[in-house]
Amino acid sequence: MNVELLDSRRLTGPNLYSDLASAVMDVAISGIATETLIGAWTQAVAELMSAMNWPLKGHIFSRVYEGGASLVFHAPIDVLYTGCELNEVALEQAMAGLRGEQPASTDEVIRKLTRQRDEEANPALLALQKASADAQLPFLWDDDEVSVGFGRASLVWPANNLPEPAEVDWDSTGTIPLGVVTGTNGKSTTVRLAASILAQAGVCAGITSTDYIRVGTEILDHGDYSGPGGARMLLRHPKSEAVVLEVARGGLLRRGIGVERANAALITNIAADHLGDYGINSVSDMTEAKFIVRRALNDNAPLILNADDEQSVRFAAGLSNRITWFSLDAEHPLIRAQMQRGGGAAFVSGDWLMLADNGNARRIVPVVDIPVGFGGAARYNISNSLGAMALCHVLGADDGALARGLVSFSGDANVNPGRGNLFVKNDVRIFIDFAHNEHGVRAVGETIGQFGAKRNIVLMGQAGDRSDKDIADLVHAICLMKPDLLLACNLPGYERGRESGVVAAMIRDLAISEGLAKEAVLLFESPLEGTQYVLSRARPGDCLVLLALTQRDEVLELVRDYAA
């Protein structure tokens, strides 16, 4: 019998398991029936909470996956650390009981947990949470600050110095339009397209992304702000008049979604990527994780989904949410059905991006006028544009702002670095993208296939924490581009459990097994070294596809110098 605690953490908002804050443990299980362990743990949690006079209210549950389980119970937001501690103690006691051993002194454990809970308790926090709910106003909290309202209509206090609800000027607070965007690929581009649209609507929009956090044109900080912390920072910023959040898988699974309410949620697409963490072991699991964003929506707030994405369509069939569909095909059955029942939709018809509500469709902007679409060649960015358009329509942008925002977003390396940046010099095309999974690379391949290059030369690498299958699928997608030359690069600092050079060598061997000639696959120590090599040997008619997952800024600088 072997049970290993993999992770214990607070879920501070709506999450994979429920709408409520919770304590969760992920455990690996072998040599014992999972149901047996869960039963013993459930009993231990209930007995501990009963002894502490901590009402359980029936909110205790588990999620079983291959090789393990997540063990979860709800707890008030002010005592979640104690909840995590109690969860771990319950696991220890359950294991001791299953081994036929006497658990550690229960009386001493109860005294310790009770003391910790009482020290952590913050009645003022709970009172403010309840008052905000009663006033139907947004409420945000963390270990340092607590706030009511969003953006310019928010009030913020230190977490250790909270007012009584009667002391709050409730009339001075309120909300602002809020959209959340998740998916496997296209999140950052979609969020930035949305910001461009909202700017054209005269709104000072804030966005979070994996690159930076920004209000209007001011970048507040660089870094990955796709989690709840970035959401709180932006939604408390006094200049935010509307906000669009990029919400990534990691933050959703580690902490839950960072907000309890939003005006709309958008899922770009769902594919195999980052599998194996937090019990998310399949595309079906990942779909469930991405759809966490629906928990921030009330009955009238739309869930905006990609009708061309098989996983989204499958999962949506079991939902009661109001859905707005978008598609590259005006004749898609879901679009046609949506139009017949007067629902919301965005789609391509002929050469135009169309928007429909109440069954009435109208033209918004020609496909060829959208810079990130490269004249329609980059179909994935036309899809991203449809999603952004549908989202911003909900957030209040009129049709003119939708069109101007999509047309004015250049998508170049200055505004959307590493995401479909095209440089051209002397009939040499250089396409830089952050595609790092099979789904994303296939989209890139479809785009460059429209360029009609004499030679396609591809630079790629992959982090060591990806599975052998993930790497094989990635290389297969690369080989569908029929590259005349493939540069397989190490990613220094991203070996993540593998020896240096192993992944690049694996890429080489897989590419040769896919049919590339041995002399057509070269190894390099880094993307920067590979870029230097290929730029020095580029010739007219070439298309250089640089999938620079690391050293992106350095690679961009080299290419800028070359193109200049």
Image (cartoon, rainbow, N blue to C red):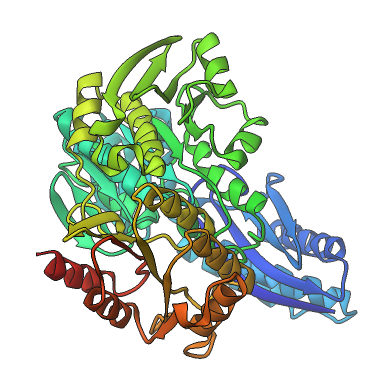
Q: Residue 77, relative to residue 368: is it above or below?
A: below
Residue drawn at 27 percent across, 32 percent down: 368
Residue drawn at 58 percent across, 71 percent down: 515
Q: Quadrant of residue 465?
A: bottom right
Which image quarter holds the C terminus? bottom left
Judging depth in this view, the residue of 523 and 196 nearest the camera is 523
Residue 329 place in picture, x, y as percent: 49, 27
Judging depth in this view, the residue of 484 and 248 nearest the camera is 484
Count of marks overlaid on the render: 0
Residue drawn at 30 percent across, 59 percent down: 431
Report whether residue 80 is seen. Answer: no
Q: Quadrant of residue 497?
A: bottom right
Which image quarter holds the N terminus? bottom right
Residue 453 place in picture, x, y as percent: 34, 56
Report whether residue 140 is seen. Answer: yes
Q: Is residue 543 left or right of residue 197?
A: right
Residue 282 place in picture, x, y as percent: 66, 57
Judging depth in this view, the residue of 44 and 255 nearest the camera is 255
Q: Is residue 57 left or right of residue 226?
A: right
Residue at the extreme left: 564
Residue 88 place in picture, x, y as percent: 65, 71
Q: Is residue 14 left or right of residue 179?
A: right
Residue drawn at 49 percent across, 10 percent down: 342
